[in-house]
Image (cartoon, coloured by chain):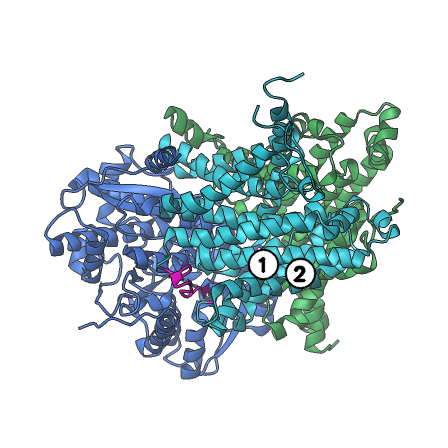
Amino acid sequence: MKKTLTTLTLAAGLLAGVPAMADLVMPSLSYRTGPYAANGIPFADAYADYFTLLNERDGGIGGEKIKLVECETGYNTEKGVECYESTKGTGALLYQPLSTGITYQLIPKVTADGIPMLTSGLGRTSAADGKVFKWVFNFPANYWDGASIMVKYLLSENNDSLKGKKIALLYHNSAYGKEPIRTLQDLSKKYGFKLSLIPIDAPGQEQKSQWLQVRRERPDYVLFWGWGVMNPVAIQEAANIRFPMDHFIGIWWSGSENDVKPAGAGANGYKALTFSGVGDGFPIYGDLKKYVYDAGKAAGAGDQHGTILYNRGLYAAMLTAEAAKKAQELSGHARITPAEMRDGMEALNVTEDLMAKDGMPKFGPAFQVTCANHGGSGQAQVMQWDAKAAKWNVITDWIQSDSSVIQPLIDADAAAFAKENNITPRDCK
Amino acid sequence: MFYREAGDFKTSYRDDGQTFPIRFDRYRYYAVLVFGFVVLPFLLNDYWTNAVFVPFLIYAIAAIGLNILVGYCGQLSLGTGGFMAVGAYACYKLTTAFPDVNIVFHILGAGIVTALVGMLFGLPSLRIKGFYLAVATLAAQFFLVWLFNRVPWFYNYSASGQISMPERTVLGIPVTGASVAPWAGYLVCLVFAVALAWMARNLTRGSVGRRWMAIRDMDIAAEIIGVNPLKAKLTAFAVSSFYVGIAGALFFSVYLGAVEVGEAFGIQKSFAVLFMIIIGGLGSIFGSFAGAAFMVVLPVMIKLVLVDTLGWPTDLGAHIQLMVVGALIIVFLIAEPHGMAQLWRLTKEKLRLWPFPH
Amino acid sequence: MVLPDTLLFAMEAALNGLLSGVMYALVALGFVLIFKASGIFNYAQGVMALFAALTLVGIQQGQVPFADLIHALTGVEMHGFGWTLPAVVAIVLTGIVMIGMAMVIETLILKHLVNQPPIILFMATIGLAYFLEGLGDTMWGSDIKAMDVGLPQGITGWIDESTNSLFGYGFYVDQLNIVAMVVAAILVTALTLFSQYSKQGRALRAVADDHQAALSVGISLRFIWVLVWSIAGFVALVAGIMWGAKSGVQFSLSLIALKALPVLMLGGFTSIPGAIVGGLIIGVGEQLFEFFVGPLVGGATENWFAYVLALLFLVFRPQGLFGEKIIERV
């Protein structure tokens, strides 16, 4: 019996897709189905396309081919766990779950298994504290940075004073949406604006009462933390009540083509943050076209190229590849382990030159990861939707978040986590 | 040949009333237990524990709980997800408030808290029946999820609104948190599942269970012959919620380790558990296990075959998986409306005559 | 006329609630039709709306159904037929698809489940919901699609202006909601006329009253089922268009069923007027609750309040406001 079971386990293990251990394995926990499919597809396509490009053009990273193992989570935490367990035995180097719920699940697991995880612009904000979260990274920016950047942008619009202004935060009533509240409350004390909180329950197809409230209270600005169907509905409703769209600013997950297109011309002028490049005017698209698209190797339907979320997928893959290169450099061999990958990520230094060399000049902020700081520089840009041209335009330079407000919050939350889980923060020289 | 009662003489009422009256069945049952307790823990790796066995056992507990309410007492409920959330949050609050008490007591405590909440939401069942009740229990589902999301006290004012399980040990061995050995988490769930299944079996064949079934079959008639509907319905809600609460607590503490209420305990969960008992068989403990196994293993199997073996795109695999699950449910309902438990019963009937049928 | 602000705002909220209620009622109608005629609580109604909307957009934009599947199986790439049909044609074609679907559902599922207890039928429709969800995605892909059949959206100018001149505060009413109201009125009138004055309609009511008696006077039960599922499919299409215009066509559209359940409960599963009145009560109730109580408890109450409201009504009328009285005999 034991033998049959072992064979069964082995067979299932084989079925679960164990690749030859020689490759650099990059799992992709994607979601191409479920309520957030529309947003998950472009990201997953780009993540796959970038690695295909590296394989085709450069023969992988440092001579080692990259093997992408895709696993469908449907944005469901249980499936996320299943995906993690089924891929981690394959020598997976880095996880990027693209879901806050799955991130929380995986934080203890990756820590125990010693596999790094990157959650760019999502997940647990206090993971920026590398002393407590050794295996988790969330560069280049997190939600609290986002909130601070929005306020900074508004300050610059209003001659550095928000005194007496009314700002409403419209948010997805979940852990994700509630992230910015604490930061905004602190900032409202600092700058003297009045903050009102308007939650929307998921999925958010019906937002009448929220927008009636906006209409009554007439806030000067609405900040928006939405996801999924909530985004297009909110933008549509804002257009319906004739809220000035350029006073309506979304976080980076509320600013993609999927969100603004259904509202048509009404969405014109809507703003959102982004920490990854906008448009397909980057040299890398030339290479992608030559080696991937035209070779018929593009992932998915191939109709997402150049969209915001596709670019974010490219960015995530680029950071991954750069970290892997760094890891190879540090360890001196090409076939790196997850632990070496982690060291590579911690030594990552993304400079303008580096991005230009990858064909992605000024694609993201320049930042350096350190042992203590896993959160990057905390910079983002503001972009604006042009409905007529159907494209996003970047309207500011990189804006730096206010770390004097955010750092104490991160320290406090990380300390609470360390205490709850009996983690002794490591020493960072 | 082996499966027959011939020669198996019962000499007491106790023997006559036992759960497995056929000797072969009894030994098979012991063999399964021994296999589950002694052999499996040595074979399990992370993948099998976390992707198959632990969710299977936890869903089995929830399914037994719901089966008590729906299958035995006839009260249709769609609030399972909400009650699981109560269990999870109660477990979290208890274990963070009293970190020195053994986690097992916290899980039991979570069950008791859920039982109380379940009774509260069971009160309308005295007036409302059938599908109206099902939809009414959705009020519990949505309200509870909203409440846990809304009130920071429930998640200890953490910045993220998520609850995460700290490391807790049983007999010095960690069973929750990051560094759990696969077998430890599995064994905790197994102990709970077996103990609760044993308890459910004995409850349902005792006087309490008979009262539930009387209410299920016709509540007015039951009332006339002296069954107190208030007591019967509320005990069913309480016991059922106790089970569901424990399932929720295990789901959070052992299986996922961190949950966000809307995501993990949404309406989908309620439907999933209801599916399990319908597929498995209403009013059957074995059916609860069978249904849970079916619903946990099937998606994994489909994924293995379509995506990992045939190499189809993951999204297509997921869509086909939905279609196959949906179609199988319908096929099942058409072929055997009484679920897998009925198939099992039929098989046993056949086995008794095998190899010499009439 | 000068009224206090709170009253004005409450009036605006109530007005919007009434109109949202119509949107809920549109979904609830489909449930009621099927429940009345066959005693099936059709959970798949929401997914049918999604499926109908997907099909409509797909046909209109000339998408190739099952393109991904064909690609995976045969490696043939297809990128649409390259036409864009006028909305009316696409709606008619989608209607035909929904009728076809009703026939398939009847032959493959309902026929085999005659005389099963209601819960089994209910579960079968959940199975159907899963299946349709997967089918819709496989056929048309799971990216978000814009619903473009030329429905107006945005603030209704004349209401804004007239209330502004009357009260000094312009009420906001979405044009889409006004359209929905008109459509719902037409739909209900048509359904009533159909069931009162046509042969099939009368047969339908006979079946709803008593299956066996209807069978014994020669009414074909199977035809009636196909008929009623087709009508429900059409209602789902209308609901899909209305909701799809709001949010784009995508997975979450199927969740509108959850908005319809409290409406049904409150109005009674068997009554078409009940669905409308229930929708209005729920719509107004949740808007006013969110307006008055929402700020005190932190908002986002709509999801559960509708259910609690319906629950309160049910405690006093266990069969819903307009449902048939439940008579129990031993």
- Report which colour depicts chain C: green
Chain A's shade in the image? blue
Magenta stretch: residue B163 in it?
yes
Residue wearing tag 2:
B118
Counting the numbered discs, the total is 2
Is residue A391 inside the magenta stretch?
A: no
Q: Is residue C174 visible?
A: no
Q: What segment is highlighted magenta in the picture? A: B161-178
A347 relative to C244, above or below? below
Amino acid at the residue labelled 1: Gly
Residues marked 2 and 1 touching at CB (< 8 Å): yes
Q: Residue B302 sits in which quadrant?
A: top left
Q: Residue at x 35, y 59 (%)?
A: B179
Q: Circle 1 is placed at which residue position? A: B245
> In which quadrant is the C terminus of chain C drawn?
top right
Looking at the image, which is closer to me, A95 or C152? A95
Label 2, secondary structure: give it. Answer: helix
Dot 1: few (<14), some (14–19), or many (≥20) neighbours within 10 Å? many
Question: A42 left or right of A33?
Answer: left
Residue C230 percent coordinates (x, y): 70, 32
Q: Position of residue A269 (x, y in %)?
A: 44, 60
Write down the quadrant of residue B16 in the picture: top right
Q: Colour of chain B?
A: cyan
The foreground one among C286 and A64 is A64
| Chain at tag 2 | B
Residue B250: where, in percent of width, then height? 50, 57
Circle nearer the N terminus (2, 1): 2
